[in-house]
Amino acid sequence: MNAFQKLGLDDHLIQAITDLGFETPSEVQEKTIPLLLEEDRDLVALAQTGTGKTAAFGFPMLQKINISSRTTQGLILSPTRELCLQITNEIKLYGKHCKGLNVTAIYGGASITDQAKQVKRGTQIIVATPGRMKDMISRRLVDISKIEYAVLDEADEMLNMGFYEDITEILSHTPEDKSTWLFSATMPKEVSIIAKKFMANPTEVTVGHKNIGSKNVSHEYFLVGARDRYQALKRLADANPEIFSVIFCRTKRDTQKVAEQLIEDGYSAGALHGDLSQNQRDVVMKSFRAKQIQMLVATDVAARGIDVDDITHVINYQLPDEIETYTHRSGRTGRAGKSGISMVIVSKSEVRKIKSIERIIQKEFTKKEIPSGMEICEVQLKALANKIHDTEINNEIEPYLNEINKLFEDVSKDELIKKFFSVEFTRFFNYYKKTKDLNSPSESSRSDDYAKDDNSARFFINIGSKDGYDWMKLKDFLRDTLQLNQDDVYKVDVKDSFAFFNTDNVHKSKVLEFFTNFKQDGRFINVEITEKKSRERNRSGGGRRSSGGGRGRNERSKGNSFRSEGKARRSDSGSSNRSPRRSSDFKPKGAGFSRPRKSRR
């Protein structure tokens, strides 16, 4: 006997379950389905994302409605379009053997006229987002006055998104004697208010404990300087070659910015946020599900529709404003019985939030170090070796082997292996050899880091963010003006009216000579070698002025702000650390390092 039969489901639903390959009900399904089938009742079910909640309310609703009637009998409200479509598709699969079943999705971003036509033809179940549903009710395009079952899915998230008034308005058009089923991952006071206002003595089912995260997810945090957050993100990605992740940012602007930076640096990344058109969001999600996108950068709201079971990591690039939201984020991984990792990148001032989250999820975080460059090189090298070792031989290569063998006749096995892996290893090694330790969040440790590098020269320059520069634009200006490679200017630190940068000592004379009495738009650009004491003084005080050398670099033309001419050029030729093309066309599919990234700082 199928384990689902013991729950009391009809044969045609059991057949659908068998077709889908379900064998054992999840805990929330085991607890809720018999209750909902037993009698009409109101229910509050608290369970984490990914525990099978859709089936927990979907099967009972399908069994209890009258399929032969064209009247709308069930309403399911969900927070986002993606989740709305996901639920609709799942309900249709559950009811594939229910002849005459019609399920309609109602959501923004699509034709309201087409949706109204579908409803008018006769639909037993409507799955809707609150905003579009309220709109259709006000236009009298839908009638929910006779529904028997109302489901509020992801109730806490709908309320976090500001849908309280829309939900109360929608429910006011439904019969008082309906059954209301509320499903939520957490139970904030707003959800309790909804339960008290629209439900009568609801039965409460809790899977695990309220607000507690999945047992399959481990939690880690990484303490870095606020300005090193993006660099830390890249290292975490590089240290996990098989990463398939969702990266959370607080705002749409940050989400787009981080995604664009990752793409520019050679990662397979995409953005998912509210400013994208529906077509753009569909394309991004399709690519992510197909694993053409390895790192999906998303806002909390947009991520509600992500239903992918094999996400390996959730990375909190920024912690959410509402600590309870962390539970939703971490629930994106560790699904379907698989293990997952939730990582948090925090600055020193945010560490206290970790303690607050620990109290909510009742789990401890593990403090971990951002991997060093050489640790990443080792991880990537081993990953490549394992992939090559496990790759099946393609016999179509046979016609080309004689020529290849002749080329390597004078090369020993050991030397050949070294040459082969050096192709990939060297690219990562060259990128990381000049990078710093990111596990030092204080400004003083940054200064110490610069001071310890005996092979580099640290410069002061009297232009900064007020002159239109961020670190990238300044780096491009210096590289192009001085005709240096991308890798030759690093550790760029831009302040309001001045900045610092490093080059190797071999370029020191060239830099100082070039900027002797150098003018741009009538203004002197002042560049000097800095010493540790003066550097620390400049960090705590105002902009530095020239004190010697007879260069006259302290001259400043009032009202004449220096700008780089046009958009900074990105000359790839001669750049020793640009993101190279994947030249290893001979390697097996999926093998090899992630692409080395363009130099940052």
Image (spheres, grey):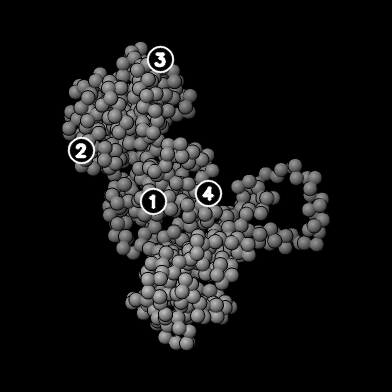
Give, as a three-letter code, the residue at label 4.
Ser
Give, as a three-letter code, the residue at label 2.
Ser
Q: Which mark is residue 253?
A: 1
Mark nearest the camera among 3 and 1 is 1
Give, as a three-letter code, the residue at label 1.
Arg
Disc 2 crowd, CA 10 A, few/some/many (<14, 14-19, 20+):
few
Disc 4 crowd, CA 10 A, few/some/many (<14, 14-19, 20+):
some
Q: Could you tell me residue 574's position as x and y percent?
A: 63, 65
Mark 3 and mark 2: span between their CA atoms?
37 Å
In this figure, which residue is indicated by the disc labeled 3?
Answer: 100
In the rendered image, the quadrant that contains the N terminus is top left
Mark nearest the camera among 3 and 2 is 3
Residue at x 40%, y 71% (from the top left corner): 560
Give, as a three-letter code, the residue at label 3.
Gly
Q: Secondary structure at mark 4?
A: loop
In this figure, which residue is indicated by the disc labeled 4?
Answer: 268
Q: Could you tell me residue 261's position as x and y percent?
A: 48, 55
Q: Which mark is residue 241?
A: none
In this figure, which residue is indicated by the disc labeled 2?
Answer: 192
In the displayed structure, does residue 476 sit left or right of residue 420? left
Q: Could you tell me residue 250's position as x and y percent?
A: 35, 51
Mark 1 and mark 2: span between their CA atoms?
33 Å
Mark nearest the camera among 2 and 4 is 4
Residue at x 48%, y 66% (from the top left corner): 564
Mark 1 and mark 4: span between their CA atoms?
19 Å
Residue nearest the viewer, comparing 274 with 520: 520
Mark nearest the camera among 1 and 2 is 1
